[in-house]
Image (cartoon, grey):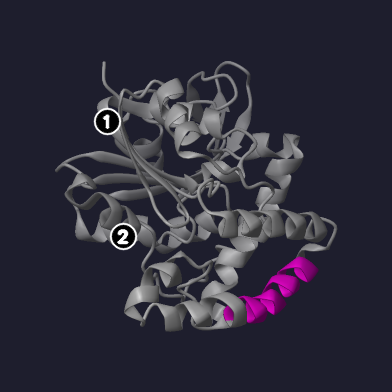
Amino acid sequence: MQDYRDSIIAVVQCPSCACALHEKDGEFLCSGCQKRYPLSAFIADFVELQQRDAIAKKALVTWGENLHHVSSDEEVHSGHFSQFEDVFGSGFFFAEGSRLLEIGCGAGEDAVKLAKSRSDLDILAMDIGENVKTLAERFRTVVNLHFIRGDARLLPLKASLFDYVVSFGVFHHTDDPEKCVKEAFRVLKTGGTAFVYLYKNHEDDLFKRSGIIAETLLMQLIRYMPHRMAQFFCHLLAWPCLLFFSWPAWIMKRIPHLSKLGNAMPLHWGTSPHSIYGDLEDRLLAPVNHRYSYKKFLELFRDAGFTEIKVVTGSGGHYARATKLG
């Protein structure tokens, strides 16, 4: 435990009162409010506060064990960082010797791949899911990568620590995306940059706005189902989604004058039920899906204090590259 403790104690603080933590009897003990947080050989757990609200409880059910669960023998596949690369090109980079935080690491694809390819980076990956404990143990030999379990709304981290913060599709599933962006700003060093992706409201696309209405109605229906039944429903729904969206989009993308429409279709990347299960569960089993206009998305970062902001809008959402200056 010593190596992990020595690495993590320098960066964490109590998420409840922001006081210092110290190790006692195999736990982190807050010097202020006296809260205790579990500490194992490979991970510290700060999710206790999540039990206080319904949205957080549902998030724990949806992502805590099931959606992003990784068993010890599964391979780590390509994640979301490649989308930031596609959008920002050379603007998505990490300077040599930088410290990086990923908020919502999911199954760990991006953090693990980056840590193995960039030994000069110091990477901290955080997620609400219990699976992050499995990730921490599985990748304990990756010396420049550490994991913590925590809440995007109340980061258990000291201020001005990181050169980069990356978060893909996380904040819009909380009850307070604004607080999440402010927390990302708080833990960044001056001159640090955040890369964030959130859903858009499709204000300029009547067809997709209709889809959002259908999504909302389905979420209301699923809300009253037991979790396993809701998962089964998503699996059944994959077939009509393939039939009416994914497969027609696949055909249109191969016809020059229809390719743009094909790429704008919902679930246009789908080839099989398995390929879209995760996305359907992400959207329909989520406790909430906040969606933003271009203007409101930009305001999230301005209101948090970011002064250098670049926003790129894709087919499904908005991407931000926001820098903390001054």
Amino acid bearing label 1: Gly
Q: Nearer the viewer, mark 2 or mark 1?
A: 2
The quarter of the picture where residue 167 lies is top left
- Residue 192 is marked as 1
Residue closer to the observer: 70 or 44: 70
Instruction: Tell me if mark 1 has few (under 14), some (14-19) or many (20+) residues whose alpha carbon lies within 10 angstroms of its own.
Output: many
How far is mark 2 from mark 1, CA to CA?
20 Å
Which residue is situated farthest in the front direction here?
Answer: 257
Residue 150 percent location from the top left of the image: 54, 40
Q: Is residue 269 above or below residue 91?
A: below
Q: Residue at x 58, y 53 (%)?
A: 129
Could you tell me if residue 141 is visible in this image? no
Find the magenta span and give its range. Answer: 228-242
Residue closer to the observer: 128 or 240: 240
Could you tell me if residue 259 is visible in this image? yes
Residue 9 inside the magenta-drawn segment: no
Residue 64 percent location from the top left of the image: 63, 55
Residue 239 inside the magenta-drawn segment: yes
Q: Is residue 72 above or below residue 219?
A: below
Residue indicated by mark 2: 82
Q: Residue at x 56, y 68 (%)?
A: 278
Residue 95 percent location from the top left of the image: 16, 42
